[in-house]
Each structure stands twice: as C-alpha cells, then as structure tokens.
C-alpha cells in the first residue's frame, strides 16, 4: 500500500500568519489518465472531513483563496497564506491513484 | 445540493453483522462511483471499498475482503455495506463518499461499535 506521511503532525499557528503542511508519498502518484490524485481534506472537531484541494492544486468551490496546494513526484504541500480562526482542525492528505487509496495521519492545526 | 446520509450503525458483539445504508441526493446517482471510508480512533482514515455506477467494478481493502460486501440500489439512490464477522478493530465511524479517487462529498458518518 502507498504510505502517506505528513509533517508536522501538530502545528500551532498565529492568527494572520502563514502555515504549511507537507505530505510525502511512498510511490509516485501519476494515474493512467496522467493526473495526480492527491487531495487535501479538513476536519473540524465533531464533523466529517471536507475536501479543500483535489488533484494537487485545484481548490474546491467555496474554499477561500488563502488555501493553495502544490507538489509533484512524491512531495506535496498545503499552504495557508494567512491563518484564520476557522482554519483550526485536522488536515489530511490523501492519494486516490493506487488502490487501496490511503490517507496521511493528519496534521492538527490550532491557534497559539 | 449533494447530500449523503448514512444510517445503520450501532453496537454489535464481535462476530455479529450490521448493514449500513447511505441515501444519496442532489446528483445522478447511477453515474457515480461510490465508496465507504472509515475513521477509527488512533487508526486514521481508511478506504474500505468502492463500487462503480452500474456495480460492474467492485474492490475491497484487504482488511475487510471476504467479510464486507458493498452494493447499491440505483432505483433507491442508495449505497450499502453488509458487514459480517465483525471484530473489535472494526469499531469506527463509517462514511460514504462520492468518487473514491476524489472524495468530493462526504456523509455525516454512522458509528459502529463492536464489543468483545
């Protein structure tokens, strides 16, 4: 199975400051159709996960433009340009290229 | 708007069975692959199974293969997960999601607790 690792696992942030989460896969993630199926999800306490970014860098509708995704090969990054209070929670990267599709362990973001 | 509503979770003894359901709305159900994902405390998120729109393509994670069966009824816009021979380690919140590669929509989840 593809192993997705994330760092850091805990990220205390200051409101208004940038934040960055790294995700690394144990294999390259280019699917037969040429796309890289790496998604980023956000889960607030007591809620189900919500997708923010799909196929590495595409932002979902309604997701603020302070969120951006990038990466290639086996290294991927989620960046928040200016953290707001509503951004707290756990962020997961996920690969949808090789079955079974797998998730990173999560990065818990909270406010300092 | 897309909605996915899971039901059927509960408390069951080890070795028992449960059938989860997911009712979908807001999109053309029979054209979409669907998937079940679970989230157990301390074990993160795990993709369990997916099924194509016409049920021709089905796959399972090794952890549930032979014990769980995914199915769908397109006339009812519903997805199912039959879970047999349940183990303590199957205790988790179970989510149905649309599109296993993209996981663009998630239900609210249903809690399954397996007592040993």
Image: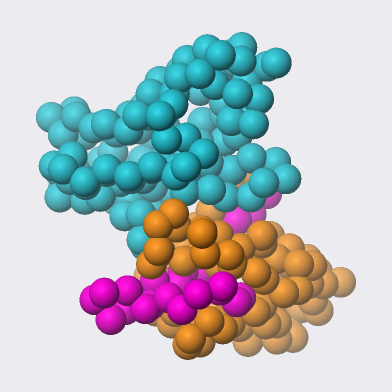
Chain colours: A orange, B cyan
Q: Which residues are magenta?
A: A23-45
In the orientation shown, which residue stands out farthest toward the right?
A112
**Image position, residue B79 (x, y; %):** 29, 33
Judge whether residue B88 can be spotted in this image: yes
> Magenta region's main secondary structure?
loop
Residue at 60%, 56% in the rendered image: A43
Is residue A41 located in the magenta-colored stretch of the structure? yes
Residue under the point 46% across and 79% down: A28
Q: Residue B14 location in percent, x, y?
A: 61, 15
Please report the residue visible at 67 percent of the width from the left and 46 percent of the height from the top.
B43
Q: As rendered, which of A109 and A30 lies closer to the eye?
A: A30
Residue A18 occupies quadrant: bottom right
In the depicted structure, whether residue B88 falls above or below residue B62: above
Relative to A27, A86 lies left or right: right
Where residue A1 appears, x then y in whole percent?
51, 59
Along the line of sight, which residue is nearer the eye, B77 or A25? A25
Please tell me how many numbered marks the rendered image carries: 0
| Left or right of residue A71, residue A111 in this image | right
Quadrant (top left, top right, bottom left, bottom right) of the C terminus of chain B: top right
């Amino acid at each position: 199975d593809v192993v997705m690792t994330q760092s850091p696992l805990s990220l205390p942030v200051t409101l208004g400051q940038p934040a960055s989460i790294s995700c690394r896969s144990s294999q390259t993630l280019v699917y037969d159709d040429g796309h890289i199926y790496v998604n980023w999800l956000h889960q607030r306490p007591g809620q189900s996960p919500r997708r923010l970014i799909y196929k590495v860098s595409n932002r979902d509708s309604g997701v603020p433009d302070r969120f951006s995704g990038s990466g290639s090969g086996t290294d991927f990054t989620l960046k928040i340009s200016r953290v707001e209070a509503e951004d707290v929670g756990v962020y997961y990267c996920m690969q949808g290229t090789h079955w079974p599709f797998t998730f990173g362990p999560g990065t818990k973001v909270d406010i300092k | 708007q897309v909605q996915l509503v899971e039901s059927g979770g509960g408390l069951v003894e080890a070795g028992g069975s449960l059938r989860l359901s997911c009712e979908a709305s807001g999109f053309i159900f029979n054209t979409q692959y669907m998937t079940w994902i679970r989230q157990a405390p301390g074990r993160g998120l795990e993709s369990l199974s997916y099924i194509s729109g016409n049920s021709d393509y089905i796959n399972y994670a090794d952890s549930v293969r032979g014990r769980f069966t995914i199915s769908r009824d397109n006339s009812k816009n519903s997805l199912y997960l039959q879970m047999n021979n349940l183990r303590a380690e199957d205790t988790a919140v179970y989510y149905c999601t649309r599109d296993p590669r993209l996981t663009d929509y998630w239900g609210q989840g249903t809690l399954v607790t397996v007592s040993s």
